[in-house]
Amino acid sequence: MDFLTLAKRRYACRQYQDRKVEPEKLQEILEAGRVAPTGANRQPQRLVVVQSKEGMERLARCTRDFGAPLAIIVCAATDEAWTRKYDGKMIADIDASIVTDHMMLCAASLGLDTLWICMFKPEAVREEFHLPDNVVPVNILLAGYGAGEPASPERHDKLRKPLSETVFMESF
């Protein structure tokens, strides 16, 4: 399947089947995150894989899990991230987002559904999963086999702004 077809197929899944993600699929998803580009190749991403019943119960104390069988808590080691010299912008959150996007699209290519979560209690995640001080949770990627009807790939024609509203050639 070509990239745009894959990207349009992916949707925010908020209901999952009670079915585990196969270990080989998880490994492929993690590998997609490993090869994702990061600023100056610093690779500050730290991924906490949660799939046990107990782990998912701990996660549920931090955010909604929507019944997903697998979560990847995407974190960044802030002391390892690249910083832009001109204004001091540290890009750990950008790096973690690129890693998340690679994993999310890989999951879609494997027939899995995902939900990218930013609505969580950071301090609760830190405590429940014993994150060191230099590691910050950036987002959580839920993954599994979706239950219910997936969103239509054609939805983008109606839900997304046209390129003419978001793209500027040569100057804003």
Image (tube, grey):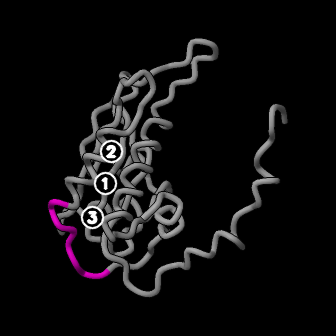
Q: Quadrant of residue 36?
A: top left
Q: Position of residue 148 (x, y in %)?
A: 42, 87
* Residue furthest to the right: 172
Vertical relation: 76 (above or below) 110: above
- Left or right of residue 101, residue 109 in this image: left
Task: Kindly indicate whether the residue at mark 3 contacts the one at mark 1 (C-beta within 8 angstroms).
Answer: yes
Q: Which residues are magenta?
A: 17-24
Q: Quadrant of residue 1?
A: bottom left
Spatial CA span between label 1 and label 3: 7 Å
Spatial CA span between label 1 and label 2: 11 Å
Mark 2 neighbour class, 10 Å CA radius: few under 14, some 14 to 19, many 20 or more: many
Q: Secondary structure at mark 1?
A: strand
**Amino acid marked by disc 2:** Gly
* Residue furthest to the top: 85
**Residue 1: assigned label:** none
**Residue 72: assigned label:** 1
Q: Main secondary structure of the magenta part?
A: loop
For the point 75% across and 54% down, the residue is 163
Query: Foreground: 141 or 102?
Result: 102
**Residue 19 within the segment the image draws in magenta:** yes
Task: Kindly indicate whether the residue at mark 2 contacts the one at mark 1 (C-beta within 8 angstroms).
Answer: yes
**Amino acid marked by disc 3:** Leu
**Residue 33: assigned label:** 2
For the point 53% across and 78% down, the residue is 151
Query: Along the polypeptide, which appears first: circle 3 or circle 2?
Result: 2
Query: Along the polypeptide, which appears first: circle 1 or circle 2?
Result: 2
Residue ID for mark 3: 70
Q: Secondary structure at mark 3?
A: strand
Spatial CA span between label 3 and label 2: 15 Å
Q: Nearer the viewer, mark 1 or mark 2?
A: 2
Q: Position of residue 80 (x, y in %)?
A: 36, 22
**Amino acid marked by disc 1:** Ile
